Image (cartoon, helix red, strand yellow):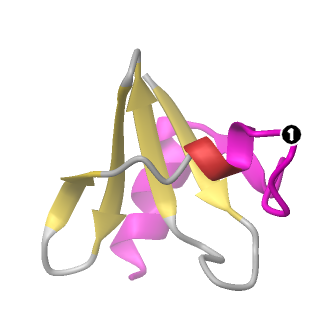
Amino acid sequence: MKFYKLNDNENRGSVVRTEGRSQQRFIPGRGWVESGVMIKYFNSDSPYYDAYSEITEEEANKLISNM
């Protein structure tokens, strides 16, 4: 499983986890929700391309606990 922190202005600080084709975004009050948000960050034609940081599970948990 991989974890990402989004860095663009619209989604700054959001945490996403991926495993295979499954993508889940953490939403405070709801938990992990299925999402396809990383498509726009992985697409080289998108203005959001590469606007994320890969983080560890521990870093993801710390960010989530501060939301």
Quick one: which residue is furthest to the top in this view?
20
Residue at disc 1, secondary structure: loop
* Residue 12 picture location, percent across and down: 66, 77
Rendering coords of residue 2 (x, y %):
51, 28
Give the camera-side residue of 3 and 46. 46
Percent coordinates x, y for residue 4 in the rendering: 59, 46
Q: Residues within 10 Å of mark 1 (few under 14, many from 20)?
A: few
| 42 is within the stretch colored magenta | yes
In the rendered view, does 43 fall on the left or right side of 63? right
Amino acid under disc 1: Ser
In the image, is 43 to the left or to the right of 37?
A: right
Q: Is residue 34 above or below residue 62?
A: above
> Quarter of the image holding residue 64?
bottom left
Which residue is pictured at 58% across the width and 43% down the height? 39
Residue 57 lies within the magenta run? yes
Report the residue marked by disc 1. 44
Q: Is residue 67 left or right of residue 4?
A: left
Q: Is residue 6 left or right of residue 27?
A: right
Residue range corresponding to the magenta coloring: 41-67
The quadrant of the picture occupied by the C terminus is: bottom left
Percent position of residue 40, x then y: 65, 51
Residue 51's place in the image compared with 27, above or below, is above
Q: How many marks?
A: 1
Residue depicted at x 13% and y 72%: 30
Image quadrant occupied by the N terminus: top left
